[in-house]
Amino acid sequence: MSDLLERLRGRGWRLTAQRRVVAEVLDGDHVHLTADEVHARAAARLPEISRATVYNTLGELVSLGEVIEVSTDRRAMRYDPNAHRPHQHLVCGKCGLVRDVRPVGDPLTDLPEGERFGFTLSGAEITYHGLCPSCASD
Ligand SMILES: [Zn+2]
Ligand SMILES: [Zn+2]
């Protein structure tokens, strides 16, 4: 399990009912939800929660560095609570399943000097595309 709720408690983040529900929806492993998915799941538990509250809370979690924004496809930004362990993503092109993966080697240091064009690098995002086992066997 990702320990998002525990981390937020540790930081003294004020856990209102609405914020708690957003954090609970995002807690877990291999969680990569769009803002709309977070809202739908949060509203299933707390029907009065507004889309604006969900968006604001997501923005706050991102600025705290406890949730990262990832763009594994062109459709929408996804929110990922696995914010403290550098990882990349494996995406199923058919059902959209997303897995956190840690490739051997560091994509940042793996970029040769001659390919950096004088840039100071701050991050690298790699998305591996393919079919998950259940889609591949269909
Ligand atoms: Zn699949
Ligand atoms: Zn991830």
Image (cartoon, grey):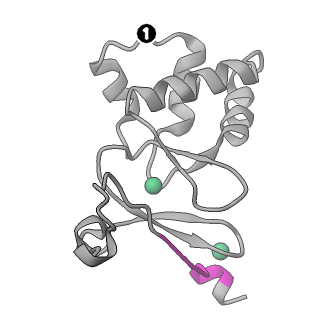
Q: Residue 45's x, y, as percent?
A: 68, 26
List x then y, in percent, for residue 3.
35, 37
For the C terminus, the quadrant is bottom right
Q: Residue 57's quadrant in the figure?
A: top right
Q: Is residue 33 left or right of residue 85?
A: right
* Residue linked to disc 1: 14
Left or right of 83 in this view: 18? right
Find the magenta span and give its range.
127-135
* Disc 1, SS: loop
- Look at 57% across and 13% down and name the residue there: 17
Number of numbered discs on residues: 1
Image location (x, y in percent) of residue 132: 59, 78
Q: Amino acid at mark 1?
A: Arg
Looking at the image, is 9 positioned above or below residue 25? above
Magenta-span inclusion, residue 106: no
User: For residue 51, which quarter of the picture?
Assistant: top right
Q: Is residue 111 left or right of residue 23?
A: left
Residue 133 sits inside the magenta stretch: yes
Q: Is residue 81 above or below residue 105?
A: above
Say which residue appears at 52% left-offset and 50% top-offset: 31
| 87 is higher (above) or lower (below) than 78 | below
| x and y percentages locating residue 131 in the rendered image | 61, 81
Q: Residues within 10 Å of mark 1 (few under 14, many from 20)?
A: few
Q: Is mark 1 within 8 Å of ligand 2?
A: no
Q: Is residue 88 above or below residue 26?
A: below
Q: Residue at x 57, y 70 (%)?
A: 91
